[in-house]
Amino acid sequence: MNVTFWYEATQEREPGENGVLRAYPQGLAAAVAEAFAGEPDVNFRAVTFHDPENGLPEEILENTDVLLWWAHVNHGDVPDDLARRVQQRVLRGMGLIVLHSGHDSKPMKLLLGTSCALKWRDDDRERLWTVLPGHPIAKGLPEYFELPLEEMYGEPFDIPTPDEVVFIGWFAGGEVFRAGCTWQRGRGRMFYFQPGHEAYPIYKDENIRQVLRNAVRWAAPSEIGPAPFCPNSPPPEAGH
Ligand code: ZN
């Protein structure tokens, strides 16, 4: 299974002391990669916005079964054509897992058709409730688990009603949030997962890593189909 982690890597390259490198001295991608270190059938690769063709030239995207998308400050800089190519590949079957502030990304908004706007506030404690035990993405997860520090994302979250809400986040300040949502788009499966603010070591948390592993397996396609088209079609019934 070819899993591509696309991320900006912009903030962690800023000169001087920065919050991302405090949380992730080896960078954000290294922590995400570690989640898949014990999965021999997962061929994990990380690409960034700063790579040639913004990290997703055709040969990489066309060889990706599941794409993870972490983004924050470069949403508007992602070429429309790249966002459309991601959308089209999801419609053909690729799995897409949008992480944290990726809610505001072009691929997410193209696929969902809404603003994906939400409320936010820095520095709060989050309790994540597993509200669909038995769902493949919830496999091995406790009834709830906590993140001592996370950015608060609150409702209303302007998304189309999800096919499934697997996790609900509760914040110590009182807000709640649909933190883990699934949608089917065309042949593809899509999962949005809210935790992952860059200044906190969220992707080192073993429960979070379990969710990522589960989500990748859930979203992996059995096959990537052709682009949908509208053929003029002869009747299959003989003599019609
Ligand atoms: Zn954030």
Image: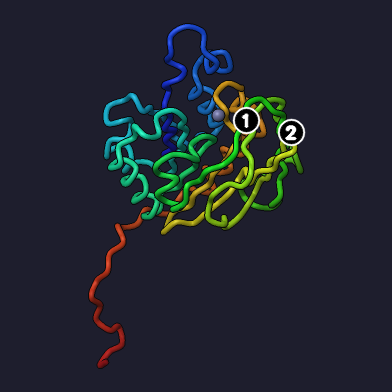
**In which quadrant of the rendered view does residue 143 lie?**
top right
Q: Amino acid at mark 1?
A: Arg
In this view of the protein, can residue 140 be seen by the observer? no
Image quarter where the C terminus lies is: bottom left
SS class, disc 2 = loop
65 lies above or below 38: below
Q: Position of residue 146 (x, y in %)?
A: 73, 32
| Distance (Cα) linking label 2 and label 1 | 10 Å
Which residue is pictured at 61% across the width and 27% down the height? 202
- Residue positioned 40% across, 44% down in the render: 107
Q: Is residue 13 visible?
A: yes
| Picture residue at 73% right of the left edge, 36% below the top | 127
- Point out the tag, 2 or 1, that comes first from the N-terminus: 1
Residue at horizontal 53 percent and vertical 28 percent from the top? 32
* Mark seen at residue 20: none
Q: Which amino acid does the dot numbered 2 rest on?
A: Gly
Tell me where residue 194 sits by quadrant: top right
Residue marked by disc 1:
121
**232 and 15: which is toward the camera:** 15
230 w.r.t. 238: above or below: above
Residue 49 at x, y = what percent?
A: 36, 28
Q: Position of residue 128 (x, y in %)?
A: 70, 39
Q: In terms of depth relative to the viewer, which is nearer, 98 or 176?
A: 176
| Crowd rating for badge 1 (residues with CA inside 10 Å; few <14, some 14–19, many 20+) | few
Q: Is residue 91 left or right of residue 21?
A: left
Contact? badges 2 and 1 (CB < 8 Å): yes
In percent of width and height, residue 110 lies at 40, 49
- Report whether 120 appears left or right of 216: right
- At mark 1, the secondary structure is strand
Q: Which residue is mark 2?
A: 173
Name the residue nearer the viewer: 14 or 212.
14
